[in-house]
């Protein structure tokens, strides 16, 4: 999470000249002691809070598209008229102010009343007619998809019962932070819950903590212990589970996986007395853990099967950049290798070497959690198969998040990705469709990964490519990569180019290949 810092720009309560904000332009100022963003669209001028409600990103440095502004940090999006958080990862609205235009000046007046609904949507009480048929909605999984779905149901005016059933004892948390700032010691635990503890009761969301669902049975789910919860609509947001290493010592007291808040707490506690750590797996989570443990002054070795980190996602050149970045911070890599045994003093490698360690973190990937869907007879194909509306092969049962496999209109292929923001946006779409909106899920996938002070941002999805075009320089830490296949741009990765990353996301949404070619020209 962040902050825009001290107030800057003009005092908008005193007003500015009308021509200070051009059509399609934005101006950062302040009012009532808060940072305020002015934006003009034609004759209309809007005034909204200038700080993203996700991590505090500066909206004035973002992208204005129509009557929406996109945050440059993690691509949340807000409606200029209502302040509504249109796209996750932001869930709460920004404030809105009244604006007066006269005598060639723009003056910001008082703040508009804040809506009472989560997310600040003005549509309270306007759920589609189909939603009136739903007395009970059950959501299995209290991760990003499930939590976002529960909030969206209330935001859309649904007044029936909502049961949000999670396996973890903790309230829904900001999971990306578990391997990033929180694990590194740069974020307090108060930042980790997505909502305050009393939020769920206040909004009529029955949050069931620490319970697993055993089966789906004729219009109800049955929890461990036998309790049955009836549903008129069901969302499976079961997520993914860590791949477990089947080697001697993998269940030892000094060995950890990272999926939950409790996992992160245990690693932090162990790191307080540890000196050397081994991370097994060169995945995103493995490398983020490595960076966080280095921030805690541990010696860190990474063991990975690959020739270079993240090459399968980013390509060789970006993989080398990630390797060099970690090595510059003291991480030692052991590529094309794996562990064959772990004990309380270290890790034995397949090549016969050994690494001393008193802390081991395993991050070799995840698998979608499909047991419940398979037992219910839903269609499964490397994930829970859903249609464009995120409905499974059984009407009234939806799936979203890491376990869902949906038809991607851009590639013409089925897709399943394991990204936090994708899961949130799918949960929101599934909630709308439970209420009868029939909204296709067509959001462009987005994720970010943090390595020390370097964020890597990725929009789109490229399972494979026939060329990578680069603009900028890794050495200068200002670079864009376009992943292309058969003449089309499938994805764009960037380092410290938030402006272009936002434009690329919108271009991918609009299938604007001409703009993508201008942003990242093809190399000869």
Image: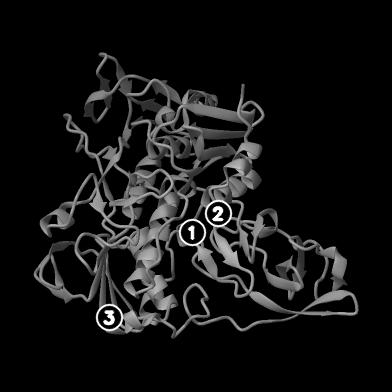
Earlier sequence position, callout 1 versus callout 2: 2
Q: Quadrant of residue 475?
A: top right
Between the C-alphas of marks 2 and 3, the distance is: 32 Å
Between the C-alphas of marks 3 and 1, the distance is: 27 Å
Task: Look at discs 2 and 3 and give the one toward the viewer.
Answer: 3
Q: Up-down: is 90 above or below 466?
A: below
218 left or right, relative to 444: left
Kindly identify the residue that appears in the image at 30 percent across and 38 percent down: 365
Earlier sequence position, callout 3 versus callout 1: 1
Q: Up-down: is 74 above or below 449?
A: below
Q: Say how the picture is coloured.
A: one colour
Secondary element type, mark 1: loop
The quadrant the C terminus occupies is top right
Give the image location of residue 138, x and y in percent: 25, 71
Which residue is disc 2 drawn over?
75
Kindly identify the residue that appears in the image at 23 percent across and 63 percent down: 210
Give the image location of residue 325, x and y in percent: 54, 28
Whether pointer 1 and pointer 2 mark residues with C-beta atoms closer than 8 Å, the reply is yes
392 left or right, relative to 115: left
Which residue is disc 3 drawn over?
134
Q: Quadrant of residue 135?
A: bottom left
Secondary element type, mark 3: loop
407 left or right, relative to 13: left
Kindly identify the residue that appears in the image at 40 percent across and 30 percent down: 312
Please name whichever residue, 490 or 364, is drawn nearer the observer in this view of the structure: 490
Task: Look at discs 3 and 1 and give the one toward the viewer.
Answer: 3
Earlier sequence position, callout 2 versus callout 3: 2
Which residue is disc 1 drawn over?
89
Please name whichever residue, 298 or 76, is drawn nearer the observer in this view of the structure: 76
């Amino acid at each position: 999470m962040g902050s825009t810092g001290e107030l800057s720009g003009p005092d908008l309560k005193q007003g500015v000249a009308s021509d200070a904000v051009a059509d399609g332009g934005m101006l950062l100022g302040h009012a009532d002691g808060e940072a305020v963003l002015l934006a003009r669209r034609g004759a209309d001028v809007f005034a909204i809070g200038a700080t993203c409600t996700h991590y505090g990103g500066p909206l004035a440095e973002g992208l204005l598209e129509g009557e929406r502004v996109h945050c440059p940090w993690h691509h949340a999006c807000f409606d200029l008229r209502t302040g509504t958080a249109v796209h996750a990862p932001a869930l709460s609205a920004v404030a809105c102010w009244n604006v007066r235009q006269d005598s060639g000046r723009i003056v910001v007046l008082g703040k508009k009343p804040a809506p009472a609904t989560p997310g600040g949507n003005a549509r309270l009480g306007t759920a589609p007619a189909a939603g009136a048929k739903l007395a009970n909605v059950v959501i299995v999984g209290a991760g990003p998809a499930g939590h976002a779905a529960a909030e969206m149901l209330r935001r859309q005016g649904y007044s029936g019962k909502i049961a949000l059933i999670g396996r973890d004892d903790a309230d829904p948390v900001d999971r990306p932070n578990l391997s990033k700032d929180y694990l590194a010691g740069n974020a307090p635990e108060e930042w980790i819950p997505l909502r305050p503890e009393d939020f769920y009761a206040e909004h009529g969301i029955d949050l069931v903590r620490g319970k697993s669902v055993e089966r789906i049975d004729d219009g109800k789910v049955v929890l461990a212990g036998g309790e049955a919860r009836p549903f008129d609509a069901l969302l499976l947001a079961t997520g993914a589970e860590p791949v477990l290493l089947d080697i001697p010592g993998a269940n030892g007291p000094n060995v950890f996986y990272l999926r939950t808040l409790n996992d992160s707490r245990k690693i932090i506690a162990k790191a307080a007395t540890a000196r050397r750590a081994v991370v097994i797996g060169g995945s995103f989570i493995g490398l983020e853990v490595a960076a966080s443990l280095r921030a805690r002054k541990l010696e860190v070795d990474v063991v990975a099967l690959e020739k270079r980190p993240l090459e399968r996602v980013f390509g060789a050149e970006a993989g080398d950049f990630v390797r060099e970045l970690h090595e510059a911070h003291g991480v030692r890599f052991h590529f094309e290798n794996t562990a064959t045994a772990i004990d309380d003093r270290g890790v034995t490698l397949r090549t016969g070497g050994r690494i001393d360690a008193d802390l081991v973190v395993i991050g070799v990937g995840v698998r979608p959690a499909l047991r419940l869907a398979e037992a219910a007879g839903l269609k499964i194909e490397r994930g829970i198969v859903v249609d464009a509306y995120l409905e499974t092969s059984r009407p009234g049962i939806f799936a979203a998040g890491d376990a869902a496999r949906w038809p991607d209109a851009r590639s013409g292929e089925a897709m399943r990705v394991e990204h936090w923001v994708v899961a949130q946006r799918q949960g929101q779409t599934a909630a709308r469709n439970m209420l009868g909106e029939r909204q296709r899920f067509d959001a462009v996938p987005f994720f970010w990964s943090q390595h020390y002070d370097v964020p890597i941002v990725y929009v789109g999805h490229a399972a494979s490519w026939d060329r990578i075009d680069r603009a900028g320089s890794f050495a200068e830490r200002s670079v864009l990569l376009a992943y292309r296949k058969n003449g089309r741009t499938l994805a764009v990765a960037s380092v410290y180019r938030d402006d272009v990353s936002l434009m690329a996301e919108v271009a991918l949404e609009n299938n604007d290949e001409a703009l993508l070619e201008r942003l990242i020209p093809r190399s000869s």
